[in-house]
Amino acid sequence: MSLSSRALLALAALSSLSLAKEVGYFDSSSCADPKGFVTCYENADTTYSNCVNNNCAGGSESCYNSCGGSTSCMNEQCPGLGIDCINACECERSALQIDCAGQSCWNQVYSCEYQATTLDYLSFCLNPDRDGLPYWPTPDDAPDSCSCNTGQIEQKLYLITNQMDTCSNNQTNIGQVMTDVDAINEYAQTCLCCSFSAIISAYDQTPELKVPFFLPFYEWFAGLLNPGHWEDCGPYLEDYDCAGDLGFGRADAGGITKFYSPGNLPTNGTKSLYNLDGVVSTPVSGDVLTWTFASSLVHTVTVSSADATATGAKASGGSDATATGTATSTATGTTAESDVKPGVGSSLRVPSWTTAGIVGILVLSTI
């Protein structure tokens, strides 16, 4: 599921127009080190191109060039490449793009653009170290931060999906050991329905915004939920306690307390994503950024132009945007084209781990 384009940040002064260039999700002219940011992204694209052409089975430069590096195009036109291999290369590029932001666009690391970049990394990489990601999720009241904290939503989705798997594999947690096939199937469907309902609640934490920010609300939910027979979930949600008996109310399972049914979905908002007021005036990480790509792979990034005059973004992109960020920046511990389009408006794409969990439960329900 690709991400759609939204309006980028407002252009800076007329004297900076010559530097304006869309780079990934960012307007490079808004970065502390615009030229360094562009160069860093170009290097990341070169790494991706070499990875696909040198490592993926059946790879060829002609296929890569004809598709402009688009993952979906290469997978369709050159199936020998292997989507898993391509995604692994996308994972590497996404990690390098996080490095680029920390190095040259450190004044934008709380923005919608950075959140979208990090979501790409989480979508393409298998078993990423979420705790090791820099600036993720965005701390509350951070300056120049996105109007929707998609990092917090993604964390909830991850926990909900883990609980979906736990629920389907644990058929004794409602006080009975099930051996009847029909009962097992009913329980598996209930786990699926509770997880879908919990996902809707996770997205609804910012009710004034469009969800998922690029598709009509019901169209998106229909595309995700209907393969799991969401339209039939009403009785299951009425008969079972999703929060208590099935565990979705626990903090380590997403902490969901409100569960929607097919006939009672929340009303969608009207605003698109935008960045709040505020300025990140000094590098949040200090002069050196260190973050963990995997348990044994640490990225160390030297921040460039740490003495640059950073500019913040005015609230934009969301209708009737009036919220402002007032917190100050503090240290926290922690040219190929892809299918992802540049722009402020990111969506929480359905990660591969979510799809895998859903498929697993659907298989269980058919035995």
Image: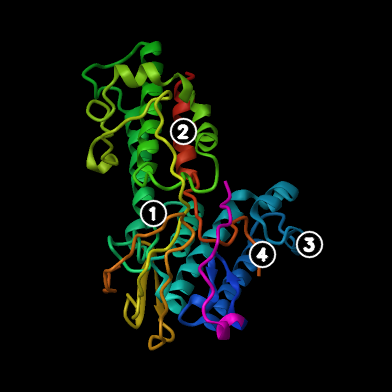
Judging depth in this view, the residue of 122 and 259 nearest the camera is 259
Alpha carbons under labels 4 and 3: distance apart: 13 Å
Magenta highlight range: 1-17
Q: Nearer the viewer, mark 1 or mark 2?
A: 1
Callout 1, which amino acid? Cys
What is the number of the mark on residue 54?
4
What is the number of the mark on residue 148?
1
Alpha carbons under labels 3 and 1: distance apart: 40 Å
Q: Is residue 218 left or right of residue 186?
A: right
What is the number of the mark on residue 62?
3
Q: Is residue 97 above or below residue 367?
A: below
Alpha carbons under labels 1 and 2: distance apart: 26 Å
Callout 2, which amino acid? Ile
Label 2, secondary structure: give it.
helix
Q: Which residue is mark 2?
A: 358
Q: Position of residue 83 (x, y in %)?
A: 62, 49
